[in-house]
Each structure stands twice: as structure tokens, then as C-alpha cells.
Amino acid sequence: SKSCVMLSQWIVEAFPSDDPNVAPVRIACLGRIAVCELLDRARPAALEHAREAVALWEYHGSTSTDVGWALAALLVTDSTIDHADAYRRVEHIVDTIGFPSLVCVARLLRAWSHVRSGDVDAARSMLSDVEPIVASIAQPGMLHTLERRVATMVEMGTDEPLLVARERNVVAALAAGASRREAAEQMHLSVNTVKTYVQRAYRALGVGTLPDAVARCGELGISLAAPDPVET
């Protein structure tokens, strides 16, 4: 939930990262933050927090099983790691504690990583194994959202776009020289709605300015040349 993420963020900011006594708590909070950022399409931030959690876990030799959240998040966000090894580590943690919520998070994110790599059949098989577990949890909350997101990706056979059409169109309009008010008029939106789309786009791209957003889109092959069709 949003309140849980806010509390986790406060703990991460309030307690020092070099205290081994605090490390298990930071690892737990960073892992949960990373998964929530994935759901918010803020993959650069999710990657940063997941890497920090795993680095703390390895440095302090912590026994925190909550690192499973961070390791699972790396399966989706980090193309440089050995995915098979990372998933084995997640599965070891899952087998050690067996919490249904962690089982679901780990396997849903593994399914997501399968979709990203093009192995949709493996993703579909893993999703079908997880669905009854999610259904058995009294208050699945975030897990239900994650399950639906992965199910949609499996159905479409592709990873979800980093930017949705509205976000891409707003960035494209601003990159072409329009002000936020002009972009709002062009797209028949309010200025506040345009501002929201800009914030979401920047968060998803991991940037803070329009020039950086344009450059990042170029790096990722996201075209800003022509507007995408948008459902009305």
C-alpha cells in the first residue's frame, strides 16, 4: 500500500546505511520500495533501490530473507545479472520461509522477466502456478495488481511500454516547443493533467528535465516524432 511505501521510504532516509544492526530493516524496506516502483513504472528507481538492498545484504552478510523482494525486482530491471543464479537465490529464500506473499512476488516477477526475454510460454506457466496462491490470500493488495499486470503482459505477449501513449504524446509536444498550456490545448486536457503526465513520464524514464527526457527517449528508441493514438 502507499502508506507502507511511505513508511519504508522514511525508514530508509532516517537510519544510516553503514549500521549492521539496521541493515536487515533497510534491506526489507528497499526491496518493498523497489517492487512498488516497478508497479509505478519507475524502473530506474526500482533498479537503484534493488541494487542497494542486494549490496547491503552481501556486504553485511545479513540473514534478512526480505532481500528476496529486491532480488526478484532485479530480474525485471537489471539485464546485466545472471538471471538463473538470481532466481535460484530467490527460490532458496522462498523455500526457507515459505511466506505466500514472497512466493507470489518472486514468481510473478520471474514471469515478468520471461515476458521481457520473449519466453511467453514459460511466463504463462509460472503465472498459472501463482494465480491460485494469490486467490487464497485474504488481502492480496499489491499482489493482485502485480498479478493483473503480468497477466496482461502474458496475454499481449510483450512487456508493457515504458511510456503510455498520453505520456509519450505530452513529452513529444513539449519537445517540439509547446508550453504545458499549449500541450493541454492540443490534447484537450487540463494543465494539471499535463503536469501529471510529465511527472509520470520523468519518473518512468528516471530523469528530471525535458532535455534529459528527450535524450533518454532517444537512447531507448522511443520516437517523439508523431503522436500515438490515444483512447478517448
Image: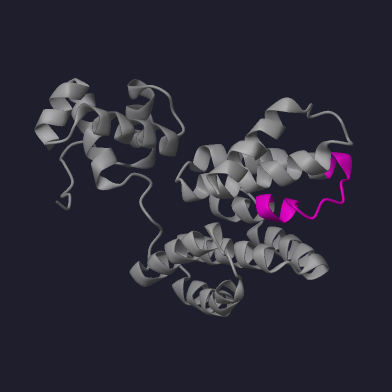
> Residue 72: x and y, percent?
64, 56
Residue 55: quarter of image: top right
Left-right relation of 130 to 228: right
| Number of numbered callouts drawn | 0
Q: Is residue 163 magenta?
A: no
- Above or below, 118 relative to 132: above
When asked about the image quadrant of residue 132, the answer is bottom right
Residue found at x 38% / y 56%: 160
Colouring chosen for the image of the structure: one colour
Residue sitting at x 78%, y 29%: 17
The magenta span reads 58-70
Query: Residue at position x 67%, y 49% from top?
Result: 70
Question: Residue 52: x, y in percent?
Answer: 70, 38
Position of residue 118 relative to residue 68, above or below, is below
* Occupied quadrant, residue 204: top left
Observer-nearest of 88 and 67: 67
The answer to whether residue 55 is visible is no
Q: Nearer the viewer, residue 210 or 189?
A: 189
In the foreground, 223 or 64? 64
> x, y (%) of residue 39?
48, 50
Quick one: 39 or 228, which is closer to the camera? 39
Confirm whether the magenta stretch covers residue 68: yes
Q: Which residue is located at x 58 percent, y 50 percent?
A: 35
Q: Is residue 62 left or right of residue 115?
A: right
Q: Is residue 25 left or right of residue 191?
A: right
Whole-percent x and y of residue 27? 75, 43
For the question of whether residue 3 can be seen, the reply is yes
